[in-house]
Amino acid sequence: MGITIEKVSKAFGDFAAIKDVQLEIPSGDFIALLGPSGSGKTTLLRLIAGLESLDSGKILFNDIDYSNKTVKERKVGFVFQHYALFKHMTIFENIAFGLKVRPFKLRPSNQEIKERVYSLLKFVQLEHMADRYPSQLSGGQKQRIALARALAVEPEVLLLDEPFGALDAKVRQELRHWLREIHEKLNITTIFVTHDQEEALEMADTIVVMNQGQIEQIGSPDEVYHHPVNAFVYRFLGRVNEFIDSENEVTYIRPHEVVLRKSAQGNSVPAKVLHVHSVGSLVRIQLNRLDTNALFEAEVNTEKYQEIGPLKKGDLLYATFSNLVAFGNEQKEALTAIL
Amino acid sequence: MNTKTIAQANTVSLQGLKKWVLIGIALAFLGLFIVIPLIAVFSEALKKGIELYFASLTEPDALSAIKLTLITAAIAVPVNTIFGVIAAYAIAKFSFKGKNILVTLIDIPFAVSPVIAGLVFVLLFGSQGLLGPFLEAHDIKIVFAVPGIILATLFVTFPFVARELIPIMQEQGTDEEQAGRMLGANGWQMFFRITLPNIKWGLLYGVILCNARAMGEFGAVSVVSGHIRGMTNTIPLHVEILYNEYNFTAAFAVASLLAILALFTLVLKSVVEWKSRKE
């Protein structure tokens, strides 16, 4: 199902959570709403679900106005950040819930419900868990059951609110791949909310970067990462060095784009090593520019590090900043407001 | 043994001593004020034999008091259970202006002396009261009649269920209800399949306490009852009348019913606490 968000606004008291948002989501897309906390991404998701009502604007499902339709009529599946499994029900009952509460005429027979629940349990690879209670499951298992429960009612849109936010790093990594696979299999329009840029870049077809209730940029992971439209997007999508020149012009460069050499070359800048730490296959080096005294970070792989290193505090290197990005003054003001 | 370990041993025994002194004080206090009076009630009740004990319970005035107490509880407890669930639901699951005022209002019966509560009903519904002329004109009797007793009991016992449920419901939040809504459940389905099972032990606990108070309430009921024998006497009022007439055996026999109710309540309460902890 395709979704169109048309000039949607929503405020809670004096706080404008969503301001005049415009967004087109094609059918079958896998989309990430990415932004810091308070950027309005969860509110937007809840507006699509019908869990919140609009102040103004329209939400269209397949070009039909659904703004005033109930949650029930929208046929959306929702996965909550903290799973929201029914504690007093078994896993089987949790998944069957959406089918059992249907009006009598639309309710499948008990046999059909049973078959459907077991096929979903198989789908999420937790068949042997049917008789357990949620408290007996791990976080990752709970989230998979929450997804199975949402899928039981055959939704046409799947909404996930920070689906992996409460899980540890390893489980999160596994579930990312798994959710991506599920989307590939079912091909239903899927929207997830995250504040983790890595998660968005890794999973989504389309990323919507949000800030202060507005959309900053919409694009593929590649577009938003390599062609950010403003400083906010640039900063939010990865590690960043920020330089301010004498005219207060701000320029940016990512740590992995900084080139370090042992000898001066072209317009390279001398810099002193402050700190070196290795993170897996990468080495991060904190340095101090000798010309402006500004601090910056460089990121090199271990191969490159062997070329220039081993380094210790106080060593002199030459840095070349060839890909400096600038966004003009307008963004700079916006940025200082955010930071 | 060097001095350090001796010092350690001393602190340990001091700790042990402290523990037992504190436990001893608590037990002595309980014994003096609860266990001994409880034994006294039963021994006084049974002093002149089991036959007189049962005779005191089965004489018409006693039976009528028992009946009225049961009727009062049978009305007050369900009404306050429904009210308590609604109030707790509203307070825990919605945000609205004046929520704190509502919470404070629910606490009023705890804060106000029951006698004053009774007096308010007399002032409202009595023949000199605000609504007195209207009620008299329509021949409706509230004060010094059964409706007054029920009203006073309702007032005194209404915080029990709500007070018990508010923290439980607040802790549970609205996540599960929202999930139910997303899965297509309507309001009734959500309440009976999600909310109610989640609060059942807390609810039962509140109902038990509410019932114990409804049956045992003296002050407010005493003011509105008028003490008409065989008509507007509940068990606690009947005990008082018997006692004032120096009919000690009968007074203690009827009082023993309330003591049995208290013991029964405690057992039930422990079972519920144990069950809810197990889940």
Image (cartoon, rainbow, N blue to C red):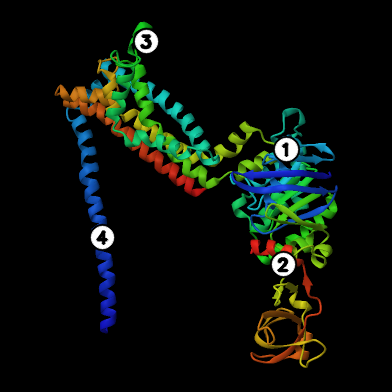
Q: Which disc, if any, is residue B20? A: 4
User: Looking at this view, is B95 or B275 the one in front?
Assistant: B95
When the figure is inspected, residue B189 is found, relative to residue B227, above or below; the finding is below
As drawn, is B101 to the left or to the right of A90?
left
Badges 1 and 2, same chain: yes
Three-letter code for the amino acid on which mark 2 is drawn: Arg
Badges 2 and 3, same chain: no
Subunit of label 4? B
Q: Which residue is mark 1?
A: A99
User: Looking at this view, is A14 or B221 the one in front?
Assistant: A14
Q: Which residue is mark 2?
A: A235
Instruction: State the CA–CA distance, disc 2 to disc 3.
Output: 75 Å
Q: Residue at x 20, y 22 (%)?
A: B241
- Circles 2 and 3: CB distance less than 8 Å? no
Between disc 1 and disc 3, the foreground one is 3
Three-letter code for the amino acid on which mark 1 is drawn: Leu
Between disc 3 and disc 4, the foreground one is 3
Between disc 4 and disc 2, the foreground one is 2
SS label for mark 2: helix
